[in-house]
Image: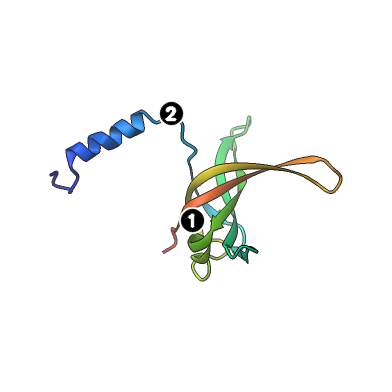
Amino acid sequence: MHKNGYCFRKFQVLLFKIINMKTKNFVQLIGYLGDDPEIHNTPSGQTLGYLRVATDHYRKKEDGSATTITTWHDIKLWNKLAQQLLGNFIKGSHVLIEGEIQYRTFLDHVGHKRYITEIKAAKIVNLDR
């Protein structure tokens, strides 16, 4: 047993699984909530939460000045994770979100095909606390 409580054999097994993993849909975002969370109950009785998270990255313009580019991400949370939102997260909260990217398509009222990219959250942490 290692001093931190990790068994070397368990570490080897975990490392083997990671190395032999062929694909993984995983995203980690650190950003700020753009609005208060929305919570809804579905007809099947599940709880669904929606968030908008802003992340920034910085670029230099040709003249050497810096500019900020903000990207907005739509986040979907289900059941217990969605219920955590109430009272713990508000507009402007600094959050860490882990989950997977999901793509959806639908036809709008005119019949045009629309594309939606969302993050299905598996974990959310309030970095303000």
Q: Height in image: 10 above or below 5?
A: above
Vertical side of 70 occupied by 41: above or below: below
Asked if labels 1 and 2 touch by Cβ distance under 8 angstroms, the answer is no
Which amino acid, by three-letter code, is at mark 2? Lys
Q: Quadrant of the C terminus?
A: bottom left
Please state the horizontal and vertical placement of residue 24, each as a whole percent of the image: 46, 35
Q: Which residue is mark 1?
A: 95
Label 1: element kind: strand
Which label lies toward us, 2 or 1? Answer: 2
Q: Nearer the viewer, residue 41 or 81?
A: 41
Give 99 or 91, whichever is nearer the viewer. Answer: 99
Residue on which the image places disc 2: 22
Q: Few, some or many C-alpha atoms within 10 Å of disc 2 (few <14, some 14-19, many ≥20)?
A: few
Q: Which mark is residue 25?
A: none
Rendered residue at 58%/52% (across/down): 75
Q: Residues within 10 Å of mark 1 (few under 14, many from 20)?
A: some
Tell me the quarter of the picture where residue 105 sits.
top right
Q: Residue furthest bottom?
A: 87
- Decide which of 125, 5 is in the foreground and name it: 5
Identify the element where label 2 is drawn.
loop
Q: Residue at x 18, y 42 (%)?
A: 7
Classify residue 44 by image quadrant: bottom right
- Residue at image position (48%, 63%) is 80
User: Which amino acid does the dot numbered 1 rest on?
Assistant: Val
Residue 57, horizontal then vertical, whole percent: 55, 41
- What is the distance, in whole Å, between disc 2 and disc 1 at their CAs? 29 Å
| Quadrant position of the N terminus in the picture | top left
Percent x, y of residue 11: 24, 38
Percent x, y of residue 56: 56, 45
Q: How many marks?
A: 2
